Amino acid sequence: MSHTVTIQPSGHQFTVNEGETVLAAALREGIVIAYGCRHGVCGTCKGRLLEGDVDYGVYQEQAMSEAEKRAGMALFCQAKPLADLEIQCREIGAAVKGIQIKILPVRVVKMQRAAPDVMLLDLKLPANERLHYLAGQYLDLLLKGGTRRSFSMANAPHDDGVLQLHLRDYGGPFSQHVFGVMKEKDIIRFEGPFGTFFLREDSAKPIVLVASGTGFAPIKAMVEHAQNAGIARPVTLYWGCRVRSDLYMNELAESWHRAGRLRYVPVLSDAPESNHWTGRTGFVHRAVMEDFPDLSGHQVYACGAPVMVDAAHRDFTSKCGLPDEEFFSDSFTPAATASG
């Protein structure tokens, strides 16, 4: 049985089919609400149930607490309607409308070990295909057995001769395949683009970019897109890693800094004395807070480990005056396995 969902205050309506989530139905009907992981982990799609009931699905408590659930919140990437709904959530503007989600084969044309545990993967689309996407979005690599792995595209849309992904070796089966078995000329498939993490170009506010680890990938795409589009807003980039070798594209970021395109601040959380590191240390989001005690007039884009993204959102909004609607993020999260 299908149900009708009405978004307030816009009044936009769409139909959810039997067994379909609110997010999947909205995207199918061309209505884009904020979302990230699609697995009930990141919390980006969280909104309020004004009327109606849902099956809350599978999610992790870090994305939605029991208190939030009792207060009428739901994760729309997991929630399936049990009746007609009225909901309140963040809708995304025209930028992502008309972007077609595709399933395509790609050929591995280059594999570059940028750090001991980071692989840069260049993927070539078929000659007659192009992928229309926004800098910051991600794709899913489709693996044997029906499993998926999500990776942000590190190249800006104007530079789409290849799609570049930044993969960290986490030691799992897919990492073992990439770092030990995969070779150039292999063919793999992907689905995408996904996500609502992209540069909001209808604002004139200064931009603060915050990356941890391979969260640098979509941030790189945003920077290169902004440069290509002639966006002149002040940009400050913070890249947090554990040790110096983790800053696997440090020279590129420094070149942006030297050219005056942005201010670049690398931050190491565990730099040994033997490295003679003279730069910033500690947690990357705290370096932002030291430099920007007042973020009320800024936009922040944060990507990387969930602990960093969550801490940045909490502290920037509660201590630095950043409006909640000016914080945009993408947490690199695994699929949900329990809860709800």
Image (cartoon, grey):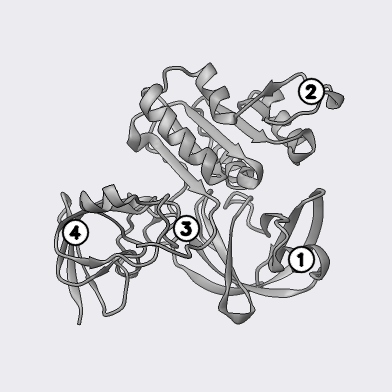
**Residues at marks 3 and 1, CA–CA distance in whole angstroms:** 23 Å
Q: Disc 3 vs disc 1: which is toward the camera?
A: 1
Query: In the image, what residue type sits under mark 2?
Result: Trp
Marks 2 and 1 close (CB-CB < 8 Å)? no
Q: Mark 1: few, some, or many residues within 10 Å (few <14, many ≥20)?
A: few
The location of residue 71, given as percent across then percent down, is 21, 49
Q: Which residue is mark 4?
A: 12
**Residues at marks 4 and 3, CA–CA distance in whole angstroms:** 23 Å
Marks 4 and 1 close (CB-CB < 8 Å)? no
Query: In the image, what residue type sits under mark 3?
Result: Cys
Lower sequence index among marks 4 and 3: 4
Q: Is residue 9 above or below residue 40?
A: above
> For numbered disc 1, what is the local secondary structure?
helix
Residue 37 is labelled as 3
Task: Name the quadrant of the C terminus.
Answer: bottom left
Q: Disc 4 vs disc 3: which is toward the camera?
A: 3
User: Horizontal placement of 8 versus 234: left or right?
Assistant: left
Query: In the image, what residue type sits under mark 4?
Result: His
**Residues at marks 3 and 2, CA–CA distance in whole angstroms:** 35 Å
> For numbered disc 3, what is the local secondary structure?
loop
- For image coordinates 66% across by 43% down, the residue present is 213
Lower sequence index among marks 2 and 4: 4
Lower sequence index among marks 2 and 1: 1
